[in-house]
Amino acid sequence: MITNLSQLDPNGTYTYADYLKWQFEQSVELIKGKLYDMSPAPRAGHQRVSMRITGELYNYFRDRTCELYTAPFDVRLPNPDYEPGYNNKVYTVVQPDICVICDPAKIDEYGCVGAPDWIIEITSPSTHKKDFNEKFDLYESAGVREYWIVVPKSAEIYAYALNGDQYVETAVYEKGSRPTSALFPDLSLDLDGLFG
């Protein structure tokens, strides 16, 4: 039984079946079978921004069919040949800060199977590069229709939407602007309130 992250080979390749057996406190993600430690816990500023965005999104989605989830919430992004129940064929499981899922068939007791419609990642010093590189590429190839990267340090939001199979930057929002979702055009956020 794996009870500590240090028992795992950092260069190993793992599946969701392995992930389900681990009995340790640390939060981890798997991206294409590679292990990513999510420690340390998010800082206060990260949590503050996350809660403010979540609050605004909750108010918007509470009477709609799409569902809002926040970390820790497992999102499994299986290979195209995935068959339900075969967790040993799922090499990617992430825990986005915030995600919106409009297809109820993607939700099961463990989280989400398949691409959420919208993912929002809030960067921290330890995740900045991963959010702009590995996760950007991962979400794009998985078919996440809209991806926002929130940067508390500079009070900016980078918004991307899928055009075919590639992300196009729809906007870079800075203080004084009102970020608007490409998928939900009647939804806009108070950027100054998020970072204030």
Image (spheres, grey):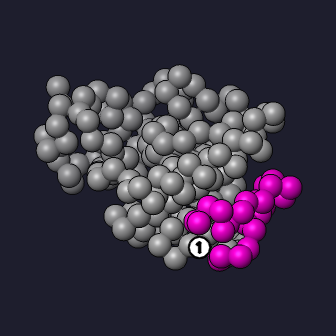
Q: Secondary structure at mark 1?
A: strand
Which residue is at the far front? 196
Q: Of 59 and 70, which appears nearest the observer? A: 59
Q: Residue at x 38, y 35 (%)?
A: 16
The x and y percentages for residue 20 are 34, 29
* Quadrant that contains the N terminus: top left
**54 horizontally vs 19: left or right:** right
Measured as percent of width and height from the top left, residue 60 is found at 77, 44
Amino acid type at image mark 1: Glu
Q: Nearer the viewer, residue 94 or 185?
A: 185
Name the residue carrying label 1.
Answer: 156
Among all residues in the image, which is located at the extreme left?
A: 7
- Residue 141 vs 152, above or below: the answer is above
Q: Residue at x 49, y 27 (%)?
A: 110
The magenta-colored residue range is 174-196
Can residue 92 be seen here? The reply is yes
Does residue 160 sit above or below 85 in this rendering? below
Q: Residue at x 20, y 52 (%)?
A: 10
Q: Residue furthest right?
A: 186
